[in-house]
Image (cartoon, helix red, strand yellow):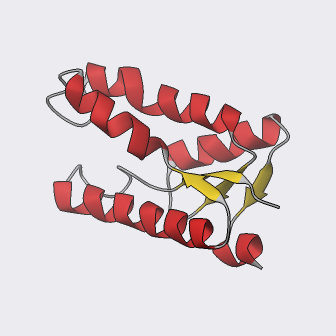
């Protein structure tokens, strides 16, 4: 059965907002999304939707008011449309929030790619 799965992992956590570290975190989520796609699922990340809008809206730095207006609200809305969440990576308050929202909405929660693709 094909699922729409939000990949939730650290974006800013532990990066000091270093652009290379932020990009590495996005890359990790995109790699997980690609694995899910190849397993027959529709995988999405909040970053894929939020970051272009944040830039277009005029954000000048990660964590500014424009960033905060868009970043987590997009992920929350997106998760409400998904069947499940895949939590990857290390500590992240935002990713943990996605898991809690998924739990509250009765969605499936995965903590390993193997659990989804098996």
Q: Residue 85 in the image: state x and y as whole percent.
A: 67, 52
Q: Residue at x 76, y 73 (%)?
A: 115
Q: Residue 52 in the image: state x and y as whole percent.
A: 29, 36
Q: Is residue 12 visible?
A: yes
Q: Is residue 63 visible?
A: no
Q: Residue at x 41, y 44 (%)?
A: 47
Location of residue 76 (image quadrant): top right
Q: Quadrant of the N terminus?
A: bottom right
How many circles with numbers are drawn on the protein? 0
- Of all residues, the one furthest to the left in this rendering is 60
Q: Residue 86 in the image: state x and y as whole percent.
A: 65, 59
Q: Residue 55 in the image: state x and y as whole percent.
A: 22, 31
Q: Residue at x 52, y 45 (%)?
A: 93
Q: Left or right of 60: which side holds 109?
A: right
Q: Nearer the viewer, residue 41 or 67?
A: 41
Location of residue 42 (image quadrant): bottom right
Against 79, residue 92 (above or below) is: below
Q: Left or right of 34: which side holds 70?
A: left
Q: Quadrant of the C terminus?
A: bottom right
Q: Left or right of 51: which side holds 109?
A: right
């Amino acid at each position: 059965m094909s699922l729409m799965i939000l990949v939730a992992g650290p974006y800013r956590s532990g990066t000091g907002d270093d652009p290379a570290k932020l990009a590495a975190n996005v890359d990790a989520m995109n790699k997980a999304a690609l694995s899910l796609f190849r397993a027959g699922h529709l995988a999405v990340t909040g970053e894929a939707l939020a970051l272009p809008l944040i830039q277009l809206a005029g954000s000048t730095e990660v964590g500014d008011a424009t960033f905060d207006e868009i970043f987590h609200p997009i992920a929350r809305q997106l998760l409400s449309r998904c069947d499940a969440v895949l939590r990857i990576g290390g500590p992240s308050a935002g990713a943990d929030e996605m898991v809690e929202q998924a739990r509250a909405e009765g969605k499936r929660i995965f903590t390993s790619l193997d659990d989804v693709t098996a």
